[in-house]
Amino acid sequence: MLDIDQISVRYDGREVLRDVSLTVKPGQIVALLGANGAGKTTLIRATNGSVEIETGEIWMDGKTIRSLSRRETAKKIAVVAQENETKFPLTVLEFVLAGRFVHGGAFGWETDEDLRIAESVLYECDLTDFRDRFMNELSGGERQRVVLARALAVEAEILLLDEPTANIDLAHQALMFRLVRARCREMNCSAIVITHDLNLAAEFADKIILLKNGEVHAQGEPREVLTSENLQSVFAVNVLLDTNPASGNVRVTTIY
Amino acid sequence: MLVAALVLAAALGSERLSFFDLTEQQRSILFDIRLPRVFLGACVGASLAVAGAALQSLLRNPLAEPYLLGVSNGAALGTMLAFVFFTGFEFARPVFAFAGAVIATVVVYRMAKSRAGMNVERLVLSGVIVTTFLSSIIVLLTSLLDAAKLRSFTFWLLGDLSQATKSGFYLTLAVVVIGTIVLSSQARALNLMMIGERDAFDFGVEVNRVRIVVFGAAAALVGTAVAASGSVGYVGLIVPHLVRLAVGSDNRLVVPFSALAGATFVVLADTAARTLIAPRELPVGAITALIGAPLFIYLLRKN
């Protein structure tokens, strides 16, 4: 279980996060919503220890993140960051196997199990045909799927996803969210997902956190959080709320 | 391939040797002059190639090379200071070369790294600036040397194996063996660093520790190689590039294969340097640069 307890983060004296608290239970998917610059990415980076927190504490299974080694943290928390490119001719399989680094030794080569897991996440992510393709030859959306596959290969307890569907076509957006949800249900792990798609959040998240200027503006179940007052206050847009007839979840329509 | 190159290099030279029926004089040429030189060449080649391969992955830039980054010139200046001020101690040269290599590495790295990260242009530019700055200090110091020392020094600056000694060879051998093992131990972490520093950090790599180990090992490798043979350029660029074409980008293969291929490459290049205009000699660095500079331009354009 992940417990973020009143953390604050400063960049160059500017407070980016203030007294943010949130609890993520096993199996839960949490959507992190907010305007640009609200501190969503910083919250994710603080959670996996790559950004220093000033006050507060992050607890993971009863231990603080800062007491864990890099390897231990990375074994528990996997990240799908925004896109990155490499200039070296790395194959998709090699890239995904990087997710198994935390399970091997320094001199180590991948074991048969590592390879089996990599092949199976490639299959799950609809990437089997891309196995031996070079990363720098893929399109942005394909690369993004490989990045998710690598995070799944870690078999971590927590998945942190920073706009995982930004460059992805509709079919693969749905695939990615279904995958993350299936993974959380089956392996009892949890996910924090940053997205700008309110309806995607309403469909897939068990809980929504609305960030505004580095503070938690509202949190709770989608129907409680996605209200016209909250959305007016955070995004300065007028919305129409009703129910998605297919799923019964709340549906948001922006009024332009 | 390395063995074949070593045998070829031992046989060829301004005095052709047949290995059988050696005269006393030929025997002495082979064992006292030629073999130490050939073996030293192999160690120097392996050192530079391994250092190049590791630096490229660490800096995420296939163009990173000890010579272009100013590391070699840092080592050269260190060696020169030892040469001028501590003539008595043989081991002052590699120690000073190591210190020079470390300082040059840190300066170039600091200059190239901006808040936005590091790009090819900044890195190459920083390397060029540091290299030319160090060169001017070296030239300044050279003017203090007398004429006889000056000629051997100019030759050495361009990369020259003709001063090979047995103790120099043993030290270089020890460093190249240890350095290759140390860098191989970081190879899997370097695979992740190739993708990106933050990315590697996210997936469990102790980025700062890997950086210190790799910079330290690379500086030690380049330092001893330069102290023994001057600035043999472009080996760290050409060899890892060819190795990657053959075995892919996995550093667990690239690092050890670069050692073998680098040794082969410099031994062959030095054989060419000794035989092309025999009985006169070229500095081996001239040969490697003749091959390396066009390749560098090609890689830069491809990027």
Image (cartoon, coloured by chain):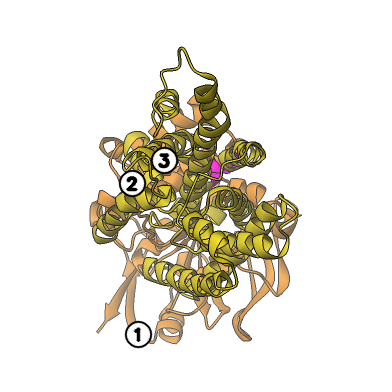
Chain colours: A orange, B yellow
- Considering the whole magenta stretch, tell me its main secondary structure: helix
Residue ID for mark 2: A89
Element assignment for label 1: loop
Magenta stretch: give its range.
B185-189
Say the numbered circle drawn on residue A237. Answer: 1
Q: Quadrant of the C terminus of chain A?
A: bottom left
Marks 1 and 2 in Cβ contact (< 8 Å): no
- Residue at position x 46%, y 12% in the image: B21
- Tell me how many marks there are: 3
Q: Chain of mark 3?
A: B
Element assignment for label 2: loop
Q: Nearer the viewer, residue A233 or B273?
A: B273
- Residue at position x 41%, y 25% in the image: B11
Furthest-top residue in this view = B21
Residue ID for mark 3: B270
**Spatial separation of the CA atoms under disc 1 and disc 2:** 45 Å
Sequence-first disc among 1 and 2: 2
Residue B67 in magenta stretch = no
Q: Chain of mark 2?
A: A
Left or right: A165 as drawn, with respect to A117: left
